[in-house]
Image (tube, helix red, strand yellow):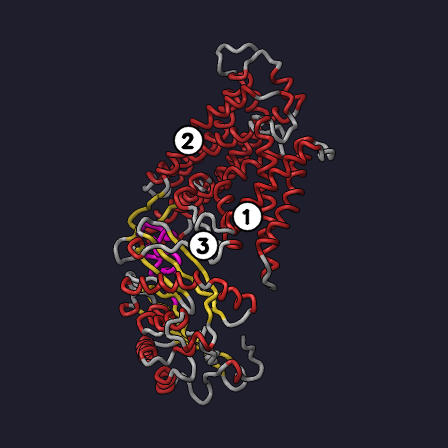
Amino acid sequence: MKSKTSFFNRTILKKNLTHFWPLWALYFVVLFFAMPFSTWQMATDQWYHDYYGNTGRMYRIIESAVQIQTEPVLIFIVAAVMALAVFSYLYSAKNANMMHALPVNRLELYVTNYLSGLLFLFLPQIINFFLTVLVAMANEITCIQYLFAGLVIQMEITLFAYSLAVFVAMFTGQILAMPVYYIVVNFLFVGCMAVINGVMSLLSYGVDDRLYPGKWAVLSPLYYLFGAVRVSEIYESHTETVTGLTISGMADATFYAAAAVVLILLAYRLYRRRQIETAGDWISIRVMKPVFRWGVAFCGSMVLSIMLIFVLRQSHLFPVYRWMVVCVVLFGFVCFFVAEMLLCKSFKVFRKKRLIEWGGFTAAAVLFLTLFRLDAFGVERYVPEADEIEAAFVNMDYQIEVPAEDIPELLAIHRDLIEHREECQKLEQEQGGYYYTTFRYYKKDGTEVTRRYPVPVTGEYLQDETSAVSRITAWERREENLLRNMFGTAYDTNQYVAGSVDLYNKDGDFQSYAMDDEEIRTVVAAIEKDVRAGNFDPYYLYSIADDVAYYNAITFDYYNENGREMWEYYSDYHGELLETSASAEHEETANTSYINIGPDCAYTVEALTELGIINDTWNLYRDDTMPDGVYAD
C-alpha cells in the first residue's frame, strides 16, 4: 500500500469512494430533484408560458434553479457531513491508531481525505449543472450563463465551507462535538455581539438590544452569506418585462474561497500536531481547553442570565445589575464545571486548581458587567454631534424624520433625558406617567445610533412647553409628519390602486366596502383636510390623548417608486435590507396604509356619508359602542 507520491494515496481515495458513496449519492439526488428535475417540471408547465410569456418564463425558471444552486445553508450542511465522514477515523481510538499505523505519512492522509470530501461535493454539483443546462436547452431556455455564474459561486462557497469544516474537525476528537463547534464558528461573531448588546440593553441606560453587525458580519460566514448571496430579476424601467437576472454575492464568495486556502494550511498544521490519544476528547488541542471552559461559562452564563432577567422584567422592575451579578455567578459555576466534566469525561472536577480558575472567571465576568454598569465605555452618555448626522428620527407616538434645522433641538432633548435619568427611571419603576420614546441617528460614516428612554408625560410635563413630551408632540402635530406616517414619505405623488372601509351594522354583521377610484380620491382628500385641521391628533398622539377611535379602519393600497412606508424608512434608512436589483425596486413600490379615524374627523366622516359608504344600516362604531356579538380589541 506504499504510495508512489508523498502527498496522495489512491487506495485511500478508492476506500473513501466505496465506503462513503451513500453520502455523495444522496447529495446528488437532492440536487437532481432541486435543479434539473424542478427545471424540467417548470419548463413543461404551460402556466408559466401563459402567465409570464416566453421571456419572463425563461428568466423565472433559471432564477429558481440558481437560487437552489447558490443556497449557502445546504452547502454548509453537506460540507460538514462530508468533512465529518472522511475524517471520522479521528474520533475513534481504534480507527485512529489503525490509520496512523499504515505506511503513509500524515500529509498523504490529510491531502487524500481532504480531496476525497471535496470531490464528493464538487462532482454532484458539476453533473447537476450540466443536466440542468441540457434540460434548459431542450426547453428553449437560452439564458444558461446564469447557471454557470451560479456554479462558480456554489463551488467557491463549497470550498470555503468544507475547508472550515475540516479546520473545525481538527479541534476535537468527539464526533458529536464537531457539528456543535461548526455551528458556533459560523455564528461566533454575531453571537458575541448579541450577548454584548443584551448586556448593554440591561445595564446601559437607553441602549437598545438591536444587532448591528455591519461589515464585520463577514466573520460569521454562514450568517453573512445567507444575506449576501441573492438572485433577483431585472425589470425594464416602469414595465412588467423581465430583461435579465442579477446575482449578488459573487465577490463575497470569491473572498471566502481565498480564505479557504489559509484554512487548508492551518488545518494541516493542526493535524500534524494532533495526538492520536485525543480520539474521543471534546478538545484535541491542549492549549484550547481553558478557552473551551471560559467560552462555555461566559456564553452560557450571559445568555441564561439575559433570558431570565428579560422574562422577570416583563412583570416587575428591579435592580438589574445586582440580579445580573447573582445570575452570572450561579450560571457561570454550572456552565464552567459542565465544560470541565466534558473535558475530563468525569464528574470529579471540583479540584482546587479548577475552583481557583472558576474564581478568576467569575471575577472577570463581574468586572465585565461592572464596566457597563459604570458606563466605562461612555455608551450611555454618548450623543452624536449635529454635523455627524445624516438623518435623525424620533419615535414616540409614531416615526418622525426630524428636519436638519431641528436636529440641534432633538439632541438637546436627548441630552436632557440623560441628565434627568433618575427622574425618568423613578417614573418607570412606579410604572406610570411615562411613554417610551426612541431616538435614532443615521450618521454620515454609515453607522447608526439608537437610544430608547421613558419620557415623562404627566400633567406637569404636558404644561411645560420646554419638556421633552411637549417639544416632541409639537413635531407630531405638524401635518407633514402625520401625512408621511399615514401615506408614506412621498404621499403627494401616491398612485392609489385600492381602498376599503370596514363597516358594521347594528346586528354586529361585518362587511368590507371596496371604494372605486373616485371614492378613493374623495376620502383621501377629506383625510388630508382633517390632518391639516388637527382632527387626527386625538387618535395618533397616544402618549397624551385618551380619545377612543372608531373600531372601523380605512385601508389604501398604493404605488410610489419615489417613496417608502414610514416604518420601513425609519428602520432601514439606507435601504440595506432591500434588494439592490431593479427587481426589488419594482416590487417594493407597493404599500398599504391603515388609517384610524374617530368622531373628531369631521371631514372624513362627512365624505363617507355623502358617498353613501356609511348610512343608517352600515355605520362607524367606537370600541365602547360596538354592537353585541362583535369583539372589540
Q: Nearer the viewer, residue 63 or 189?
A: 189
Q: Secondary structure at mark 2?
A: helix
Q: CA distance from mark 1 to mark 3?
A: 14 Å
Q: Earlier in the sequence, mark 1 or mark 2?
A: 2
- Residue flagged by tag 1: what amino acid is it? Leu
- Residue flagged by tag 3: what amino acid is it? Glu
Q: Is residue 625 visible?
A: yes
Q: Is residue 504 magenta?
A: no
Q: How far across and how far down the image is residue 93, in percent?
A: 66, 22
Q: Is residue 425 left or right of residue 464?
A: right
Q: How far across and how far down the image is residue 623, in percent?
A: 51, 80
Q: Is residue 583 magenta?
A: yes
Q: Is residue 300 left or right of residue 258?
A: right
Q: Secondary structure at mark 3?
A: loop
Q: Secondary structure at mark 1?
A: helix
Residue 508, above or below 180: below
Extreme residue in the left direction: 237
The residue that label 3 is drawn on is 380
Label number found at residue 369: 1
Q: Nearer the viewer, residue 551 or 294?
A: 294
- Residue sitting at x 55%, y 48%: 369
